[in-house]
Image: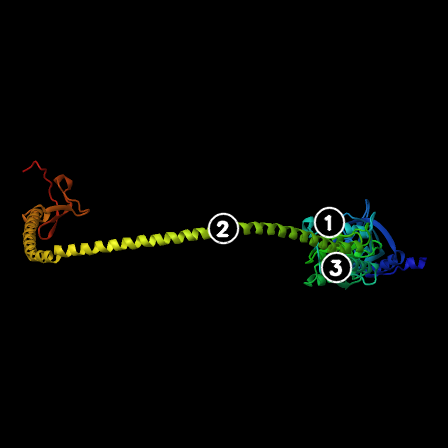
Amino acid sequence: MTGHNLALPLLLSVSDVTRLIRNSLEDQFQDVWIEGEISNLRAPSSGHLYFTLKDSQSQLRGVLFRSGALRLRFALQEGLAVIARGRISVYEPRGEYQLIVDSLEPKGVGAFQLAFEQLKERLSQEGLFDEARKRRLPAFPRTVGVVTSLTGAAIRDIVAVLRRRCPIVNLLIAPVPVQGDGAGASIAEAIDALSAMPQVEVLIVGRGGGASEDLWAFNEEAVVRAIARSRVPVVSAVGHEIDVTLSDFAADHRAPTPSAAAEAVVPVLDEIMERLDELARRLSRIVDTMLQMQRHRFERSLNVLHEIRFRIQTEAQRLDELRDGLTRIFTEQLTTLHREMVERRHLLLAQGPQSRIQRSLVLIPQLCKRLEQEARRGLIGRRQSVALQMAALDALSPLAILQRGFSIVQTVSDGRVLRRASDVAVGASVQVRLAEGQLVCQVDKVMPSSIA
C-alpha cells in the first residue's frame, strides 16, 4: 500500500470487509484436508449437518450440506475423529469463518467399515439377527425365488445347480442391479415382491464376488429389513466364503457361494428317487412277510372255525331235544292247572258268595243309623266343653275385669303400666283405660300404699 493510500484510507462497511475476507479465504483455501474431532453436532430437519472440528488447542466450525450428507456411508457421532475435505469460507451474517465440507472419512477406519459396524450394532439391538428368528428351509420346495442380476455368473451357477439337482423345481427370478446407486432399494423391492407370491416357498438373495464396495448393496438397511420381514425363509449367497454382509446375519441360512445356496434349497432328485425305490422295495418285502403271516393265521383260524361249527351243530341238536322236552312238560302242567281251576270254580259257586253278600247288605242301613246317633251325641258333648272353656277365658280376660269397675293406668310418655304409686311423679300425665273409653289425668298427689 502506498503512502497516498495510507493518507486517504478507504471507508468500508462491515459487509464490505466481511466479503473481502471471504473472497480472500476462499482464494487461499479452496481445497484443504483437515483432521479433527467432531463436537457440537446438530442435524436439523433441513438435512444439513452442523458441527465443530477441534483438536487440543483450537476449533473450527464446519457444515456438510444435505447433498453431501446423503452420500455419507456412516453416521457422524460426537467424539469421532475424522478427516474432512472442503474449502474455507465466511458465514457473512455472523462474520465467522467456517469449513464447507465436501467429503468426510473416519480416521483410522474406512467409511464402509464404520458404516457396516454402526448399522450392524443398531439392527442387532433390534433383534433382527437373533438365532431364534431363523427358520428351517423347506425340505421339498416346489417354487424357488431368486433375487440377483441376470448378467452375473451367480444366476448361471444357481440355475445350473437347480436343474442338475432337481429339474422339476419351478424358478422365479427377479432381476435387479446388485451394485451402484439404487441397487439396495431395487433388491429390497424384489424380495418383498417374491415373498408376497403364494407359490414361492424359499428365496435366494445374492450375487457373485467383488470388492467390499461392490457388495455394499447387501449391507443397506432396506435390504436387511426386507430379508427379516420375508414371509418365506431366505438364503443369503453374497460373494465368496470370506465375504460377510449384513444380509448374511438377517437371512435364515447363509451360503458361502450362490452354487452352495442352490444346493441348500433343493435336494438331489435322483437320490430321492433311489431312496423312494429302496423304501418301496423294503415296503414290498414287509407287506409280503405280513401277508404270509396273516395267511398262516387265517388257515389256523379256519381250522378253529371248523371245530367251532361242529360244536355249534352238536349244541343245536341238544337244544332241539331240550325244546321238545320242555314243550311236553308245559303241556302237561297246563292241563293239570286247567283241571284244578275248574274244580275250584265249582267249589266257589257251591259256597254261594252272592247270597252272603245279600245278607250283609241288610245290615248296612242299621249300622248307618247307629253311626249317625253316636256322631250326634259326640258333637253335643264337644259343644258343651267348648262353651265351658270360653266362659273360663272370659272370666280371666282383662276386659272382663274392666267391666267390673276396675281400670288400667299407664304413663302417657311410653305407655308403661303403673303398678305402684311411687312409679309416677307429681305433675306427670297418666292415661286411665276404662271398660269404655280412656282418660288422660294429671297426678296432683302421690300417696304411699301404707296410707289408707
Circle number at residue 308 = 2
> Dot 3: what SS?
loop
- The span from disc 1 to disc 3 (Cα, nearest Å) is 23 Å
Residue 174 position in % (x across, y down):
76, 63
Residue 330 appears at what percent x and percent y? Answer: 30, 54
Residue located at (93% from left, 59% from top): 4
Amino acid type indicated by mark 3: Gly
Inter-mark Cα distance, 2 to 3: 99 Å
Local SS, label 2? helix
Q: Quadrant of the N terminus?
A: bottom right
Question: Is residue 54 toward the left or the right of residue 8 in the image?
Answer: left
Q: Nearer the viewer, mark 2 or mark 1?
A: 2
Q: Position of residue 383 (x, y in %)?
A: 7, 51
Callouts 1 and 3 close, C-beta under 8 Å: no
The residue carrying pointer 2 sits among few (fewer than 14), some (14 to 19) or many (20 or more) residues within 10 Å by Cα, namely: few
Which numbered disc flags the more N-terminal residue, 2 or 3?
A: 3
Residue 70 % position (x, y): 78, 59
Dot 1, how many residues are within 10 Å of its Cα: few (below 14), some (14-19), or many (20+)? Answer: few
Mark 1 is on which residue type? Glu
Indicate the secondary structure of the residue bearing disc 1.
helix
Given residues 291 and 74, the one toward you in this image is 291
Residue under circle 3?
A: 47
Can residue 10 be seen in the rendering of this structure? yes
Type of the residue with mark 2: Ile
Q: Can you say which quadrant of the picture contains the C terminus?
A: top left
Q: Quadrant of residue 187?
A: bottom right
- Which callout, 2 or 1, points at the residue further toward the start of the chain? 1
Mark before the other along the chain sequence, 1 or 3: 3
Which one is nearer the viewer's eye here, 434 or 214?
Answer: 214
332 or 121: nearer the eye?
A: 332
The label nearer to you, 2 versus 3, is 2
